[in-house]
Structure formats: C-alpha cells, structure tokens
Image (spheres, rainbow, N blue to C red):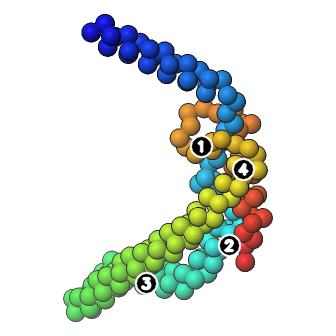
Amino acid sequence: MFRSLALRSAMFCLAIALFSSVASAQVKIGIINVQKALADTDELKKASEDMAKKYQPRQDEMDKLQKDLESIDAQLNSGKLNQAAQADLQTQGTRKQRDLQRLSDDMQADVDRDRQAVLARMSEKMQAVINKLAEDKGLDFIVEASQTLYAKPVYDLTTEATAAYNKANPAK
C-alpha cells in the first residue's frame, strides 16, 4: 500500500514537472470567426449575386401567383359573384395556392443545395488559407471565435483571413 502511494505521488510530481515545463513555453494563438470571414469574401458575395440572378425568374413567377391569389381573394370577398363563379374561383385559388407552395418548396430546396455546395467548397479553401496564415505567423493554435469566451482583439485574425482568402481566390 505504501509502495502504491509512493508510486502515485512520484507519478503526480513527474506529471506536474512535465506540465510546468510545457506551460512555461510561449504558445502563440489566433482567433478567427470563420463564418464572418467567409461571409465577407468577394467569392461569397459574387456567388450570392449569381444565385439571386439564377432564381429571379422563379421568384417572379411566385410573385405573380401571389398577386393572382390576392386578386381571387378580393373577387371572392366582393360579394358580386354567383355560386358557380365563386366555386370556380375557389378551385382556381386552391390550385394556385398549391402551385405556389410547391414552387416555393422546390426553390428553397434548390437554393439550400446550391448554398451548401458553395459553402462546402469555400470552407475547404478557407481551411487552407487558415493553415497558411498560421504557418506564416508562426502560430501554434487558431481557435474559432464562437468557441472563445474572451480574447483580446489583437488575437483576432478574421480580417486577415478574409483578405488572404480574397487574394488566393479572386472572385470570377
């Protein structure tokens, strides 16, 4: 028992001695808000513009359907229609509402798919930029800003990461 206690004490002292020598070494860190760094890149801004242009015709079609639905609703609420006309308009309204919902769901799925593809591609590029930034600055760690409770602003490399990304990956 004494031998086990002595062995544990010796191991504990050895661990403290090793930790204190590592702790006394200068560790260089940086903080990056990756989400903000990506959002501020020229490539993402260009991709957003391109996506808006790509989906504008579908958005216009959805706007037209919405106006048609408002017109149908106004006609139904006017009280000037006979029952057959009301039934016809309600059928048209139901069909247009279903078309609008389907078009909206399809467009949202397509936008989400395109956005995820762009972000996945850009995230890989940003990781390479961050690695190079760490090497160039001689940093031991780069931590995601959202995982940090406090850091001095001097450690924030978000703007530098965005600039390095824009330089390495110019928007086309």
| Residue for point 43% across, 19% down | 11
Q: Are marks 1 and 3 in contact (CB under 8 Å)?
A: no
Residue denoted by label 4: 135
**Quadrant housing residue 86:** bottom left
Please indicate, yes or no, whether residue 78 appears anywhere in the rendered image.
Answer: no
From mark 3 to mark 2, how far is it between C-alphas? 29 Å
| Residue for point 76% across, 50% down | 136
Which is closer to the viewer, label 1 or label 4? 4
> In this view of the protein, which residue sits in the foreground, 29 or 140?
140
> In this view of the protein, which residue sits in the foreground, 95 or 52?
52
Residue denoted by label 2: 46
From mark 2 to mark 4, how far is it between C-alphas? 29 Å
Residue denoted by label 1: 143
Name the kind of residue labelled 1 in the image. Val
Q: Quadrant of the N terminus?
A: top left
Q: Secondary structure at mark 1?
A: strand
From mark 1 to mark 4, how far is it between C-alphas? 14 Å
Q: Position of residue 126 (x, y in %)?
A: 64, 60
Residue denoted by label 3: 65
Counting every numbered tag in the picture gives 4
Q: Residues within 10 Å of mark 1 (few under 14, many from 20)?
A: some
Q: Position of residue 145 (x, y in %)?
A: 59, 43
Q: Are marks 2 and 1 in contact (CB under 8 Å)?
A: no
Q: Are marks 3 and 4 in contact (CB under 8 Å)?
A: no
Q: Residues within 10 Å of mark 3 (few under 14, many from 20)?
A: some
Name the kind of residue labelled 3 in the image. Leu
Q: Residues within 10 Å of mark 4 (few under 14, many from 20)?
A: few
Mark earlier in primary sequence (2, 4): 2
| Residue for point 72% across, 73% down | 171
Name the kind of residue labelled 2 in the image. Lys
Q: Quadrant of the C terminus?
A: bottom right
